């Protein structure tokens, strides 16, 4: 069962597949400070609840560039996930070049020694109308 935060305009869903040991995160909208804070806490909680997570896949195709609160949270989240030894891959999919550049810059700032875990997929995972919201 997927965990959801926010609403149709801004939010996220988080789901874990025990067969693949993958945590899939979908995000959308222009986040408020509350959603940005809740998002980081929710992803960390779900990753810990799932136990052994090998892959974290972020579908950020409908996410707008983030305010300062979201940027701080994204840095903290990537630093935490990148230093978790069991996690082998962190994939991030975007459709917006502006969002991609922002997320990439923040990831480089937060975990430069673990960038080999990051995979950028322009639109490959990004939902196109058939969202799970």
Image (cartoon, helix red, strand yellow):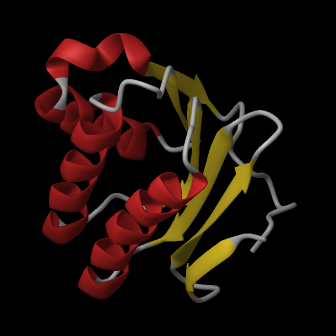
Q: How many marks?
A: 0
Q: Residue 52 sits in which quadrant? A: top right
Q: Quadrant of the C terminus?
A: bottom right
Q: Is residue 94 visible?
A: no
Residue under the image location 78 percent in, 71 percent down: 1
Residue 17 drawn at (x, y percent): 77, 47
Choose between 29 and 18: the one closer to the eye.
Answer: 18
Choose between 1 and 73: the one closer to the eye.
Answer: 1
Residue 36 drawn at (x, y percent): 32, 73
Residue under the image location 55 percent in, 62 percent down: 27
Using the image, determine if residue 116 lies above or below residue 70: above
Using the image, determine if residue 71 lies above or below residue 67: above
Residue 43 drawn at (x, y percent): 45, 60
Q: Residue 53 sits in which quadrant? A: top right
Using the image, determine if residue 53 lies above or below residue 7: above
Determine whether, in the image, residue 73 is placed left or right of residue 91: left
Q: Residue 95 sits in which quadrant? A: top right
Q: Residue furthest front?
A: 51
Choose between 110 and 28: the one closer to the eye.
Answer: 110
Residue under the image location 25 percent in, 33 percent down: 107
Using the image, determine if residue 11 lies above or below residue 117: below
Residue under the image location 41 percent in, 18 percent down: 117
Residue 15 drawn at (x, y percent): 69, 59
Q: Residue furthest right?
A: 130
Q: Is residue 17 visible?
A: yes
């Amino acid at each position: 069962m997927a965990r959801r935060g926010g609403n149709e305009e801004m939010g996220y869903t988080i789901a874990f597949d025990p067969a693949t040991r993958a945590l899939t995160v979908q995000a959308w909208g222009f986040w408020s400070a509350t959603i940005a804070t809740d998002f980081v806490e929710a992803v960390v909680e779900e990753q810990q609840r799932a136990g052994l997570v090998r892959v974290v896949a972020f579908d950020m195709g409908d996410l707008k560039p983030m305010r300062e609160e979201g940027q701080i949270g994204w840095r903290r989240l990537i630093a935490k996930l990148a230093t978790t030894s069991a996690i082998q891959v962190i994939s991030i999919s975007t459709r917006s070049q502006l969002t991609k550049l922002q997320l990439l810059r923040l990831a480089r700032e937060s975990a430069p020694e673990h960038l080999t875990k990051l995979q950028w997929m322009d639109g490959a995972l990004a939902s196109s109308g058939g969202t799970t919201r």
